[in-house]
Image (spheres, rainbow, N blue to C red):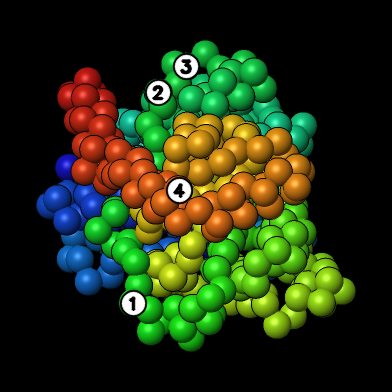
């Protein structure tokens, strides 16, 4: 098959999923054309079947906002025509579903019919999409997609609550390639922490929805009881506030801000516990990646996290903002070698149930059935 994938190129989960899917399908022998405004961080450029098209928006002084959707729609039209694509898969509704719809109308005018699958990832619905400034256009473009998928049952339910959706929404969860995740040798761990110290990790885009100040407060409570290290991976608007809090709580020697990284596997591979106390989380891909690295997760009981983490088996889920309960969960695990080892093994086996082979296969089946229907 010849597949177009449209995504955000950033470290966020939707871009990571889209890119990993493209890499996987390329390895399976399909031809992939990934369209975005920059090279996606995890795209496998060594794979000859995976191609990248950059959307170029020439700045023009008349425009207060540069018309990205227009440039994207035009790039989609050109790519579908030139590369003879069978199907488009857009990740994250805003602005991709809208631009893909426009492209499909332009192509229809040229007697070309291109089906569109829209995958909803979370904030495109729960935060950005429900904003009245975008809602009608988001709702319209979801309803005009050929097929709609959501990354969790929870996101499917939220979407039908927030929007008048006339299309059935198929739940296809995110996946992880567990072969890329492992425990790292002790020598790497020793570059961060002493053997007596636990390593706690958080990975996100440091937006308010991630509640990274809760991460610091939870860590403070843990560290008061047990000398530990916290690795903060990622970057974003709340970083400065978090660094100030670390300083004010006297934790500067124990908290490391690593910034954005291409090698999240190594950070997770030396960690003991992963913290994700988010306000909302449609799935929690970073939690799944931690679990693939044998790292139990302590998180909030929200959205799709309930479909990823099994409370009391491979992690703990608490109410949003309950930093006391989350700190107790972390300490319960750190103070019980047998429990943490059981949770760690169970985390890995849960992650394996979200395998790339299984979920990638579901997407392939979906593409085939849509393309066959079209013909
Ligand atoms: O979490 C973010 O702010 C990034 C966002 C994205 O678009 O990359 O993540 C969303 O999509 C991920 C991939 O499907 C999910 O794992 C995240 O849970 C979801 N984020 C939220 O719902 C807050």
Residue on which the image places disc 1:
185
Q: Report the side of 280 relative to 177 (left or right).
A: right
Circle 1/circle 2 CB separation < 8 Å: no
Mark nearest the camera among 1 and 2 is: 1
Element under label 1? loop
Looking at the image, tell me whether mark 4 or mark 1 is earlier in sequence order. Answer: 1
Residue sitting at 38 percent across and 58 percent down? 293
Question: Label 4 near label 2: C-beta < 8 Å?
Answer: no
Marker count (numbered): 4
The image shows residue 62 at horizontal and vertical percentages of 75, 63
Q: Are marks 4 and 1 in contact (CB under 8 Å)?
A: no
Mark nearer the viewer, 3 or 2: 2
**Is residue 7 positioned above or below 45 on the image?**
above
N-term-proximal mark, 3 vs 4 = 3
Q: Nearer the viewer, residue 80 or 141?
A: 141
Question: Cβ–Cβ below 8 Å for labels 3 and 2?
Answer: no
Rounded to the nearest angstrom, the CA distance separating label 1 from label 2 is 40 Å
Q: Residue at x 33, y 61 (%)?
A: 181
Question: Could you tell me if the residues under marks 3 and 4 are in contact, i.e. CB atoms within 8 Å?
Answer: no
* Front tag of 3 and 4: 4
Residue under pointer 4: 339
Local SS, label 3: loop
Q: Which mark is residue 167?
A: 3
Give how far apart the Cα atoms at labels 2 and 4 are. 36 Å
Q: Nearer the viewer, mark 1 or mark 3?
A: 1
Using the rendered view, name the quadrant where residue 3 is placed.
Answer: top left
Does residue 245 appear to the left or right of 80 in the view shown? Answer: right
Residue 74, visible in the rendered structure:
no
Numbered tag placed on residue 170 in the rendering: 2
Camera-nearest label, 2 or 4: 4
């Amino acid at each position: 098959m010849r597949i177009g994938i449209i995504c955000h190129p950033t470290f966020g989960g939707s871009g990571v999923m889209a890119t990993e899917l493209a890499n996987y399908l390329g390895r399976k022998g399909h031809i992939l054309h990934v369209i975005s405004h920059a090279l996606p961080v995890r795209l496998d450029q060594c794979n000859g079947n995976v191609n990248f098209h950059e959307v170029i928006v020439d700045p023009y002084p008349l425009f207060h906002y540069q018309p990205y959707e227009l440039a994207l729609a035009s790039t989609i039209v050109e790519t579908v025509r030139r590369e003879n694509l069978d199907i488009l898969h857009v990740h994250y509704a805003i602005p991709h579903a809208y631009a893909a719809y426009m492209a499909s109308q332009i192509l229809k005018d040229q007697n070309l019919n291109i089906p569109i699958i829209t995958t909803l990832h979370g904030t495109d619905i729960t935060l950005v999409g429900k904003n009245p400034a975008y809602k009608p256009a988001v709702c319209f473009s979801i309803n005009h997609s050929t097929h709609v998928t959501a990354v969790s049952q929870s996101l499917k339910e939220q979407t039908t609550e927030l929007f008048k959706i006339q299309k059935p929404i198929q739940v296809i969860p995110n996946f992880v390639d567990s072969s890329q995740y492992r425990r790292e040798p002790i020598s790497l761990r020793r570059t961060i922490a002493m053997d007596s110290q636990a390593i706690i990790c958080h990975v996100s885009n440091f937006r308010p929805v991630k509640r990274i100040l809760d991460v610091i407060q939870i860590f403070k409570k843990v560290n008061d009881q047990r000398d530990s290290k916290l690795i903060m991976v990622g970057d974003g608007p709340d970083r400065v506030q978090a660094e100030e809090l670390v300083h004010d709580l006297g934790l500067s020697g124990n908290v490391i801000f690593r910034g954005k990284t291409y090698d999240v596997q190594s950070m997770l591979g030396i960690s003991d516990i992963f913290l994700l106390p988010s306000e909302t989380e449609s799935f929690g891909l970073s939690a799944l990646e931690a679990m693939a690295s044998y790292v139990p997760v302590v998180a909030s009981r929200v959205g799709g996290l309930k479909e990823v983490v099994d409370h009391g088996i491979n992690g703990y889920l608490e109410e949003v903002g309950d930093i006391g309960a989350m700190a107790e969960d972390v300490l319960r695990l750190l103070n019980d070698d047998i429990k943490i080892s059981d949770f760690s093994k169970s985390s890995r086996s849960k992650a394996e149930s979200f395998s790339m082979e299984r979920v990638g296969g579901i997407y392939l089946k979906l593409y085939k059935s849509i393309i066959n229907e079209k013909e």
